Image (tube, grey):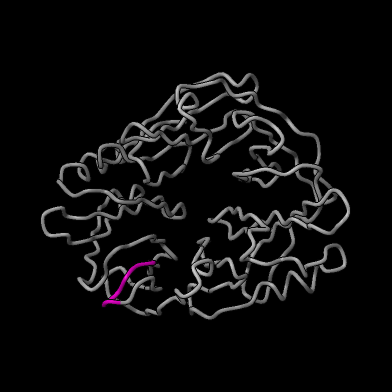
């Protein structure tokens, strides 16, 4: 605990603005993307809680407008950014800031650039899977079509027609889909959850249909439950449903209290995290510079705590701690 307080205090001394943060649980590290407001120089700061160290990675001045970044392993990071005048590029850098690889995305079709970043892979909405180690692409549609076409007619799986939702457990390379079969028998919502080991080795954790659908899907760490905001109820009611290899099991319905944000038309934006006892939800706000994270007990939907974070920034749950950014400073809370 003392290491965490010490490193966070050191990190917050500077006047640099924190843009994003990511975790790397294998070595108990936080990666902070920071910018100097005076000269717009960008760096990545690593808070190594295990070894009680701080490391800085200065980025090439040709790199700008970083949309996302991600630690691939102990030696390399992935960035989605503009580079040397090109927009929306892949970038792979080492811990000294040297660019190992860069490649421009196809930006002509916007939907192709929607991405889900896993630990070792990047998934695009056109069903392309990119290995972050060697940047080779694999068409995941072929795997899905080969393995599930007997159960589901994938003729209607078009990424440009908003017919499926994506959810994931990034650290475990787990990718999930809710797919709508407009011409199939009821129930028409088909779920597939995959464990991606390599581009040619993919395991099916779950596949099956459900009688209702929803939004903001989130998987539990043990992949035994899925939480979502049901499309058949008001926006402040959630479901948590058991998952088994055979079917979706019984569900628990959470009647989350009415809150201040709802009065202005704002509802749950994301299910951040949940376990056997608690659930954490993100609420955006219209009239302030902060978003809200609220933590509830599952058994009675009682509010435990409310956290204000900088609007649009990321947050991470690691080792029963919630790391978040407020007023451009890193904070954490025991959960």
Residue 95 image-quadrant placement = bottom left
Where is residue 205 drawn, in percent x and y? Answer: 74, 57
**In the foreground, 224 or 181:** 181
First to last magenta residue range: 79-85
- Residue sitting at x 52%, y 33%: 267
Where is residue 227 drawn, in percent x and y? Answer: 65, 39
Q: Is residue 315 left or right of residue 330?
A: right
242 vs 83: above or below: above
- Residue sitting at x 54%, y 20%: 258
236 vs 113: above or below: above
Residue 181 image-quadrant placement = bottom right
Where is residue 117 drawn, in percent x and y? Answer: 50, 61
Q: Is residue 98 left or right of residue 116?
A: left
140 vs 310: above or below: below
Decide whether residue 56 is among the magenta residues.
Answer: no
Q: Is residue 269 left or right of residue 164?
A: left
**In the foreground, 274 or 128:** 128
Magenta stretch, overall SS: strand
Where is residue 213 drawn, in percent x and y? Answer: 72, 44
**In the foreground, 335 or 237:** 237
Q: Is residue 177 left or right of residue 186?
A: left
Residue 162 image-quadrant placement = bottom right
- Residue sitting at x 38%, y 40%: 323
1 vs 50: above or below: above
Work out which quarter of the rendered image holds the N terminus and state it: top left
Decide whether residue 81 is among the magenta residues.
Answer: yes
């Amino acid at each position: 605990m003392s290491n965490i307080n010490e490193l966070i205090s050191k990190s917050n001394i500077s006047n640099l603005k924190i843009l994003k943060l990511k975790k790397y649980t294998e070595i108990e590290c936080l990666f902070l993307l920071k910018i100097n407001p005076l000269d717009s120089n960008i760096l990545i700061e690593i808070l190594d809680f295990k070894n009680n160290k701080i490391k800085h990675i200065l980025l090439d001045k040709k790199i700008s407008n970083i949309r996302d970044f991600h630690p691939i392993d102990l030696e390399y990071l992935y960035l989605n950014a503009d580079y040397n005048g090109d927009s929306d590029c892949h970038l792979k850098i080492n811990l000294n800031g040297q660019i190992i690889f860069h490649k421009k995305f196809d930006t002509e079709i916007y939907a192709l650039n929607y991405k889900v970043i896993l630990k070792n892979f990047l998934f695009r909405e056109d069903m392309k899977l990119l290995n972050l180690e060697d940047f080779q692409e694999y068409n995941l549609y072929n795997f899905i079509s080969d393995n599930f076409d007997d159960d589901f007619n994938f003729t209607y799986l078009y990424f440009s027609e908003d017919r499926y939702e994506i959810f994931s457990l990034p650290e475990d390379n787990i990718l999930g889909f809710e797919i709508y079969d407009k011409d199939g028998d009821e129930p028409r919502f088909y779920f597939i959850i995959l464990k991606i080991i390599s581009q040619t080795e993919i395991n099916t954790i779950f596949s099956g249909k459900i009688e209702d659908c929803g939004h903001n899907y989130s998987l539990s760490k043990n992949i035994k439950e899925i939480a979502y905001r049901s499309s058949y109820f008001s926006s402040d009611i959630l479901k948590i449903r058991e998952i088994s290899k055979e079917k979706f099991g019984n569900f628990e319905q959470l009647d989350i209290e009415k809150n201040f944000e709802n009065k202005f038309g704002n509802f749950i934006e994301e299910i951040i995290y949940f376990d056997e006892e608690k659930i954490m939800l993100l609420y955006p706000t219209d009239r302030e510079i902060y978003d809200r994270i609220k933590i509830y007990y599952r058994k009675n939907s009682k509010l435990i705590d409310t956290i204000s974070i900088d609007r649009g920034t990321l947050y991470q749950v690691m080792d029963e701690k919630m790391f978040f950014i407020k007023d451009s400073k890193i904070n954490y809370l025991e959960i």
